Image (spheres, rainbow, N blue to C red):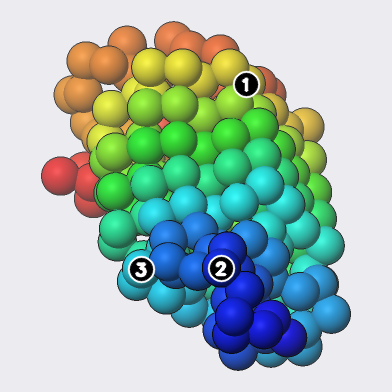
Amino acid sequence: TVSSSNPYYKSVDGVLMTKDGKTLVTYPCGKTDSSYTVPDTVITLEKNSFEWNNNLKKVTLPNGLRSILWYSFSNCESLEEIVIPDSVVDIDLGCFNYCDKLKKATIGKGITRMEESFAYCDSLREVYFRGDLPEDYDHMLYCEVSSQTVYYPKNNPTWKNGSIKLGFCKQGQGDFLR
């Protein structure tokens, strides 16, 4: 718990947040819930905020979220799917690394930077980009699973017909993103 007189932090249902509610600092790795909805006030997920939580299967991110910082969801072994809202512009290094059961990720239209964000997700098979190729995409989907496919908007010139360095992933296009 956090004292109500603490000028910097508060606890909301056991989750540590900044006093103004704009940053989710820590979701306890021992929390046993299988799903969690990040409050609408949150614009930043702090470094390591969900790391090592092995109970969460689903996390719903708010439309106003802007940044997902280093290793936020790293080693969340039960996480199955993630939808990154269009409002997110930055997914830092290692944010979803080693999420062993993550099968599908949808990346919103606002992303401008992703850095090795989905490395070693052994079950990840589908990654859907709703918008342009991020300006900074250094090994954004580095993986060793050859059956992974990346989908992006058809006829979008930023994707250069799939000639980008994603890691070891297949690439495809889809009309579903229009």
**N-terminal label among 3 and 1:** 3
Residue lying at 22% horizontally and 31% vertically, measured from the top left: 154
Residue lying at 59% horizontally and 26% vertically, measured from the top left: 115
Q: Residues within 10 Å of mark 2 (few under 14, many from 20)?
A: few
- Look at mark 1 in the image and give the residue it sits on: 139
Question: What secondary structure is found at the residue carrying circle 3?
Answer: loop
Q: Position of residue 133 (x, y in %)?
A: 35, 24
Q: Residues within 10 Å of mark 3 (few under 14, many from 20)?
A: some
Question: What secondary structure is found at the residue carrying circle 1?
Answer: loop
Q: Residues within 10 Å of mark 1 (few under 14, many from 20)?
A: some
1 vs 2, front mark: 2
Q: Up-down: is 143 above or below 51?
A: above
- Look at mark 2 in the image and give the residue it sits on: 7
For the C terminus, the image quarter is top left
Q: Position of residue 42 (x, y in %)?
A: 42, 63
Q: Up-down: is 36 above or below 105?
A: below
- Look at mark 3 in the image and give the residue it sits on: 41
Which three-letter amino acid code belongs to the residue tagged 1? Answer: His
Which three-letter amino acid code belongs to the residue tagged 2? Answer: Pro
**N-terminal label among 3 and 2:** 2
**In front here: 106 or 176?**
106
Q: Up-down: is 31 above or below 158?
A: below
In the image: residue 5, left or right of residue 20: right
Residue lying at 61% horizontally and 51% vertically, measured from the top left: 46
* Whether label 3 touches label 1, CB < 8 Å: no
Label 1 to label 2: alpha-carbon separation: 39 Å
Q: How many marks?
A: 3
In the image: residue 109, left or right of residue 70: left
Q: Position of residue 123 (x, y in %)?
A: 72, 54
